Amino acid sequence: MFQRILVANRGEIALRVIRACRDLGIEVVAVFSEADRGAPYLELADQAICIGPANSAESYLKIPRIMSAAEVGNVQAIHPGFGFLSENAHFAEVCRACKIEFIGPSEDAMRRLGNKNEARKLAVKAGVPVVPGSEGLITSESQALGVAHDMGYPVLVKAAAGGGGRGMRVARDDASLKTGLVAAQQEAEAAFKDGSVYIEKYIERPRHIEIQLLGDKHGNFVHLFERDCSLQRRHQKLVEESAATNLPAEVRQRICDAAVRLAKEAGYYNAGTCEFLLDKDNNFYFIEVNARIQVEHPVTELVTGVDLIRQQILIAAGEKLPFKQKDLHHRGHAIECRINAEDPANNFRATPGLITRWQAPGGLGVRLDTHACQGYRVPPNYDSMVAKLLVHQPTRLEAIACMKRALREFVIEGIKTTIPIHLDIMSHPAFISGNVDTTFIERTWSRP
Ligand code: MV4
């Protein structure tokens, strides 16, 4: 087992990993940029090392700086958290070259799954349903038109290297396909230095269902059920929950089985998530794999009782999964609201600054994952998430009621936050009935 781990991240997830290490009796080294110097969570690490300026390209994303800190800190493993270097196969490769364990999947699995067209091919091979689409990459306009005419409009042009909705264009006719193809290619080239695209049938108003997976290095896999992450705005998730509402047990079982098949086919290990679109007829289609721990992992921790970060560390150390599929049970209902330093009344403009008052909610079934507190200054340089508020209750309606209570208890002053829109969402009839999809937020809270 590792004696000492470095956390190559910041904020809430850095604190989450620090805690998991403490629980395991593992020493932990934190890193910080100038913008995070003096942040309270750094005091919970055994050592904290400055890795550069506020700009993440010069600190949290700078591999030589992280590796130097790992050397100075004398660690045997690095946990990358999410974002930053978490899905960077080259970083994993550098870790291996330095004989430091990367706490995540193999470089090989990351490379193959990082390309969505490759991941799609792997899914087909594993017998996992994918959205009908082009067989491989699109190399010409005439080919694109041919695929679209065969499938029928609307179609979606997607960047193979894409993610987070970048390099995607919907086309509803030949004209918009021609312009969308070029636009998607250019956007992908600029964002990922890889302009390759493919085409899928466009699924209107899908739900976003994802399956949490764990695999060890001995070929054992389990799923930890689903999360419904349909409530998002501009590809930023706002609310996640488990179980997914109105999802027939038989469909749920088939999605979970499909996700495990894909993980096996990919030779995957550590934590990962398989993303699916669910159409209005409950057909599901694989879209991509997230080869990292995700922001919303605590939703799954609440309903399964499994500490996912602890499992990540144990898997990286070569241990076998301590449970089998039949040992895992889904209990109750969990909801997560992401509390961001953003003003929902002002087009979600970022609102960094000093938190002058912070009164955290609590009580049975309430979990708050945060690195912030009264007197903490939210830096303007990073993601605006300041807390994840979660509830776990026997039923969905009880969870919604508890979330409303917790949101009302939560006092944050000095900065505007997304708490008000979460209260509106929790009170919205469409949300309460589970009648939502990935377009709900933008349809309901669009600017006049
Ligand atoms: C789609 C789609 C509809 N049809 N693919 C968005 C980012 C990437 N993860 C995949 N995405 C989508 N792919 C087809 N064939 C709609 C989306 C989509 C979406 C997916 C999940 C969560 C939120 C979304 C918001 C807008 C579009």
Image: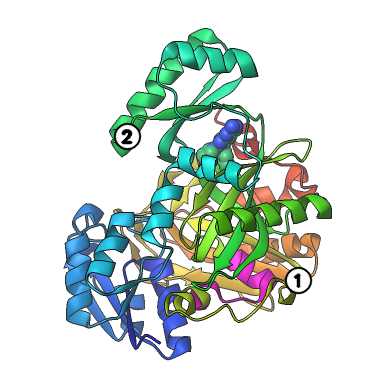
Is residue 352 rendered magenta in the image?
no
Is residue 306 rendered magenta in the image?
yes
Residue 400 image position (x, y, % from top left):
73, 60
What residue is shown with label 1? Answer: 331
Ligand 1 closer than 8 Å to label 1 CB: no
Quarter of the image for the C terminus: give it. Answer: top right
Question: Is there any visible trace of residue 145 in the rendered image?
Answer: yes
Kind of residue at disc 2: Asp
> With 432 as the anchor, is 180 left or right in this view?
left
> With 165 as the anchor, is 101 left or right in this view?
left
Residue 256 image position (x, y, % from top left):
69, 56
- Residue at figure coordinates x 52%, y 73% from the top left: 218
What residue is shown with label 2? Answer: 194
The quarter of the picture showing ligand 1: top right
Furthest residue toward top: 175
Quarter of the image for the N terminus: give it. Answer: bottom left
Q: Quadrant of residue 349?
A: top left
Residue 275 image position (x, y, % from top left):
58, 48
Considering depth in this image, is 54 or 414 the residue closer to the camera?
Answer: 54
Relative to 199, is 330 above or below? below
> With 424 as the anchor, is 401 left or right in this view?
right
